[in-house]
Image (cartoon, rainbow, N blue to C red):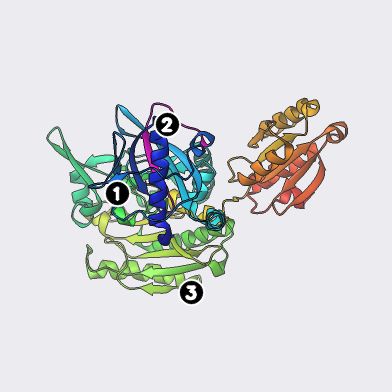
Amino acid sequence: MDEYRQLWLKGAIIYAINLVSKGFKVVSIGLGERDFYVDIESDSILNLEEAKEFAKPSNNEYKINDNKLLYGNQEIALNEKITPSGNPQYFEILNISVHHPSPDKQYVRIRGVSFETEEQLKDYLSWLEKASETDHRIIGEKLDLFSFHDEVGSGLPLFHPKGQIIRNELMDYMREINASMGYQEVYTSHVYRSMLWKISGHYFMYKDKMLIFNQEDDELGIKPMNCPAHIMIFKSRSRSYRDLPVRFSEFGTVYRWEKKGELYGLLRVRGFTQDDGHVFLTEDQIKDEVKILISKTLEVLGKFGFSSNDVRLNLSTRPDESIGSDQLWEKATSALESALKELKLNYVVKDKEGAFYGPKIDFDIRDSLGRWWQLSTIQVDFNLPERFKLEYTDKDGSKKRPVMIHRAIYGTLDRFMAILLEHFRGKLPTWLSPVQVRVLPVNQSVQEYAKTLLSEMLKEKIRAELDDGDTLAKRIKRAYDEAVPYIVVVGRKEMENGTLTVRSRGNVERVIDAKQFISLLKREIVDRDLSNTAVSNS
């Protein structure tokens, strides 16, 4: 869309002038990745219909001087260095949001596009519709899942109620997986004294991505990883060989200050939540533990529809910047390689791409568009136990050093969610969908029956909503647009027979006994099925 940027900027200027002419205080104009934006200072927000009233061509004269648009008695910041050009005639307003540049000001940001011909606009809207199926940023905005805000900071997402439902479902599933492997969940703080990071080596090896500050004569760092805190929990009491393996898990939010140009939606952020886990064990337990983790990781990825052909395993070896002896690195690498070979899995060696404290197995997955993403990781670490002087008492009473395994199966909730949104093109499986059923009464005469159905679904923990506004056609389209897996339509016939008409994805429609549908749907959700089995099994 680069060829339209000058035209969009011209359209933004025209739109801004139209607002100024009606008394609005426009403060800045600029370009986004796929549109223009106009900021107005206002205590109240415009709705989409109000904003569209000003989206029309005009021929008002203006001046541009020193990156400022001069019109009437207003100076408007022009946040672009390119020259506006073209003759915009056709406009479309895409989105309205609010942000706060300072504590006492509110800006309303209006985003839109402009084109010289109606055909160009139609082509763009068609492209945007296709992009909205495959770009998690557009999907997230369209489905009201998450947002980013200037005043919050770059790379720091805010998850809305529907987005948090998806996160909670992912966490609940991972808690079941962790429990099946004997993990105990912990919680650790976000900030620690720099002393901890100096012992772990992060202070010296990872400092460029850490947020370090001074408070009350003490230097502290916001955690980029959870492992040092889990180490301290292990170290908080004496341990015996009988206790090992000790397995800790945590949905730990960490912060890594990635460069601004590298940030990309949820795929590359500065604050994210890992499904983290650490295992403390003896050297002879490593191989079996790694085999369990590999198998469980493949099981989890399979649950989301990633088959063996969609998963690629990598063995990443010692990087140039690392800690520890060659002997310890060789032991750790050998343990990972032995586990892969015993499971008869193909893998690729990635030379010098391990963590600074140990080698690792990484899992790449291929999504529905054929793109590969690095997600899960299993890392064997002899070095942090050495640096923290971890101990356990062996059978003969001697003190031994445990080994540590770092693992994350999703990798991070944020990236995993982004990949799922793009993989399923926004149409998540029912168990992950924020709204699982939309109940649509045909008219007011069946309102009570629709409410009864809704109540029965809610009792079974099914996330259902009732929509009785607008025409039936508009309500059905709204449910489709919002990626609701099941649309339940009820009229007089359904009320009299105790049935419902259900539409699922793929334009499948069935008339089903209401109680049977609820039972089948509950089973689909509990089993975490990928397809609409409540209809296909009816």
Nearer-N-terminus badge (2/3): 2
Q: Is residue 333 above or below residue 474?
A: below
Q: Is residue 454 above or below residue 418?
A: above
Residue 33 lies, in percent from the top left, at: 40, 53
Q: Which residue is mark 1?
A: 224
Q: Amino acid at mark 1?
A: Pro
Q: Nearer the viewer, mark 2 or mark 3?
A: 2
**Which range of residues does the magenta coloring cover?**
34-48
Q: Residues within 10 Å of mark 3 (few under 14, many from 20)?
A: few
5 drawn magenta = no
Q: Residue at x 24, y 70 (%)?
A: 326
Q: Which mark is residue 22?
A: 2
Q: Which residue is mark 3?
A: 346
40 drawn magenta = yes
Q: Residue at x 39, y 50 (%)?
A: 10
What is the spatial separation of the Cα atoms under label 1 and label 3, in whole angstroms? Answer: 31 Å
Residue 337 in sight from this viewpoint: yes
Say whether residue 147 is left or right of residue 432.
left
Quadrant in which the N terminus is drawn = bottom left
Residue 179 in sight from this viewpoint: no
Residue 321 lies, in percent from the top left, at: 22, 65
| Nearer to the camera, 510 or 58 | 58
Say whether residue 432 is left or right of residue 534.
left
Nearer-N-terminus badge (1/3): 1
